[in-house]
Image: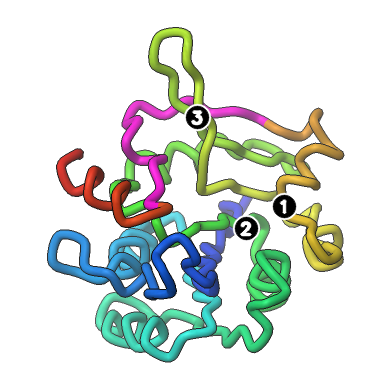
Amino acid sequence: MRESAVDAILMASGFSQRFGGENKLLVPFRGKPLVRHTLELACGINRIKNVILVTSFDEVACEALKLSHLRSIKIIRNDHPERGQRESVRLGVEASSADWYLFFPCDQPLLDAETVTRIIGAAKTEGQIIQPFFRRGAMQRSGNPVLFSASFREELLSLREGEHPRDIKAMHPEAVYFVEVENETALLDADDPETLLKLEGLG
């Protein structure tokens, strides 16, 4: 039996409102634009068949082109970022013919290959949604990236205004499988400049 194909869908079309209008995906983090960390990570994971970047920004697309020596990256232009996350989801899913879609935000610079591989490895049967989480004492926090079986393809393609993939999770709680990850910093995202600065000192 063939190994299930997993495509990485990198969603890079947000407006970075908490960064005061500056495109946070291009803000330097440890010497590289923030988006480069996610691009390089996805390119380096063997279990990922295709890396699909959905973006509204030419500068972000250029960062992907710089990595052509690692592997080919499908760059999908999002001309309607005002439609929200659902548009990036739709474009990414349309570009994929894989068995699984792994949705990456591009603002988790400490996400690592071990964590991503653990998420992919938790996929056992079609119809699952794999959500990572970490635990610290009594506190539990879920995060991204989230892995969707292609059996949810039509629902992902038909999200309406204001809807997100998390709404599909809410409609199918029986499909959601939580996988615990060991690196708690891997799921931390940089929502604002202050948080990004804190992440510089972690990991």
Q: Could you say which quadrant of the image residue 31 lies in?
A: bottom left
What's the CA distance linking mark 3 and mark 1? 17 Å
Residue labelled with disc 1 = 165
Image vertical order of residue 116 relative to residue 14, above or below: above
Q: Nearer the viewer, residue 82 or 54?
A: 82
Q: Is residue 2 left or right of residue 135?
A: right
Residue type marked 2? Tyr
Q: Is residue 186 part of the magenta span, yes or no?
A: yes
State the residue at coordinates (79%, 46%).
Answer: 167
Q: Is the C terminus in the top left, top right, bottom left or bottom right quadrant?
A: top left
Q: Which residue carries the number 2 mark?
A: 101
Query: Which amino acid type corresponds to the residue marked 1 in the rendered image?
Result: Pro
Mark 3, Cα crowd under 10 Å, few <14 / some 14-19 / many 20+, is many
Q: Earlier in the sequence, mark 3 or mark 2?
A: 2
Q: Is residue 21 above or below residue 120?
A: below
**Above or below — where is 111 with respect to 140?**
below
Quick one: label 2, few (<14), some, or many (20+) residues within 10 Å? many
Task: Tell me which corner region of the image, top left, top right, bottom left or bottom right, holds residue 98.
Answer: bottom right
Residue 37 in the image: state x and y as whole percent: 29, 62
Query: Percent x, y for residue 86?
Result: 72, 66
Tell me the SS state at disc 2: strand
> Could you tell me which residue is drawn at 74 percent across and 44 percent down?
126
Label annotation for residue 21: none
Q: Which residues are magenta?
A: 177-190
Between 186 and 138, the residue placed more toward the observer is 138
Residue located 38% across and 41% down the image: 188
Q: Residue 67: percent from the left, percent from the top?
A: 28, 80
Q: Nearer the viewer, mark 3 or mark 2?
A: 3
Marks 3 and 2, how far apart in space?
Answer: 18 Å
- Residue 158 in which image quadrant: bottom right
Which residue carries the number 3 mark? 133
